[in-house]
Amino acid sequence: MSTFHFKYFSIKQDDTAMKVGTDAMLLGSFVDVSNKYRALDIGSGTGVLACMLAQQNSNLIIDAIEIEDKAFHELVYNTSNSSFSDQINPIHEDVLIHNPNYQYDLIVSNPPYFEDTYLSEDKERNLARHVLDLTPFKLLNLCNQLLSEEGDLWVIIPSKNVNEWQVNAENLGFHVSTEIKIMGVPGRHVRSIIRFSKQIHPKFRYVFVIREANGNYTNEYKNRTLEFHIKPPIR
């Protein structure tokens, strides 16, 4: 069994196309869940983000939505066997038709990417990794409808797509309140974590480095993920 063990929960990932990775670890550790009460995790996969958010705020109720069958089954297994089962609602649905009778004050997503690469023969992996129907504009437009006026949207996206996301977001009335440039190693910008808000907030920007030039994790990364890992990662 392929299982990723965290300090307070475990993630079974035998059948899902996308395994627990650095992107989810960083996004889950940076999202500000303070004073939030209802969240939506778009493309929840195995539920790692949902569990990380629930761990940080016991008052937060999370709708974890996943379209792919195998990932959804592991999402249900992981969340129901965690200490946060009463906080997380797994939903097997296409997010584009998700229509709750309430709004969220927090939405998080590690969205699909690699839209300019060839599709593989693995349909589940394609759903998880490729921009098919869920374009940045469609996702942002959906979040604009689902978010409350005080709500925040947190995403992690490839560095080359940051400008596209920001332009689309601004056209819909969002404001960038946080941007964290993620460096794989010093000087190599690979991802950005962005917090989009409907309200205007002071802008918070900084650079975060995952690994030293020698390949070892930085102290910055170890400290950031300390509350989730059973022990700090070495390499």
Image: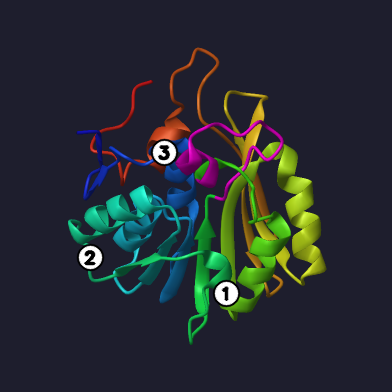
Secondary structure predominantly adopted by residues drawn in magenta: loop
Q: Secondary structure at mark 1?
A: strand
Q: Nearer the viewer, residue 95 or 9?
A: 95
Residue type pointed to by label 2: Ser
**On the picture, is 131 further left or further right than 55?**
right
Residue type pointed to by label 3: Ala
- Report, in whole angstroms, how far the alpha carbon at label 2 lies from the one at label 3: 23 Å
Q: Nearer the viewer, residue 115 or 34?
A: 115
Residue 46 visible: no
Q: Residue at x 64, y 47 (%)?
A: 131
Callout 3: 10 Å neighbours few (<14), some, many (20+)?
some
- Report, in whole angstroms, how far the alpha carbon at label 1 lies from the one at label 2: 24 Å
Q: Residue at x 57, y 74 (%)?
A: 151
**On the picture, is 49 further left or further right than 139?**
left
Mark carried by residue 17: 3
Labels 2 & 3 near each other (Cβ < 8 A): no
Q: Nearer the viewer, residue 188 or 125?
A: 125
Q: Secondary structure at mark 3?
A: loop
> Mark 1 or mark 2: which comes first in sequence?
2
Q: Is residue 148 magenta?
A: no
Residue 124 visible: yes
Q: Secondary structure at mark 2?
A: loop
Q: Position of residue 168 (x, y in %)?
A: 78, 60
Which residue lies under the disc numbered 2? 85
Mark carried by residue 151: 1
Q: Nearer the viewer, mark 1 or mark 2?
A: 2
Q: Residue at x 52, y 81 (%)?
A: 103
> Mark 3 or mark 1: which comes first in sequence?
3
Q: Position of residue 49 (x, y in %)?
A: 40, 53
Residue type pointed to by label 1: Gly
Callout 2: 10 Å neighbours few (<14), some, many (20+)?
some
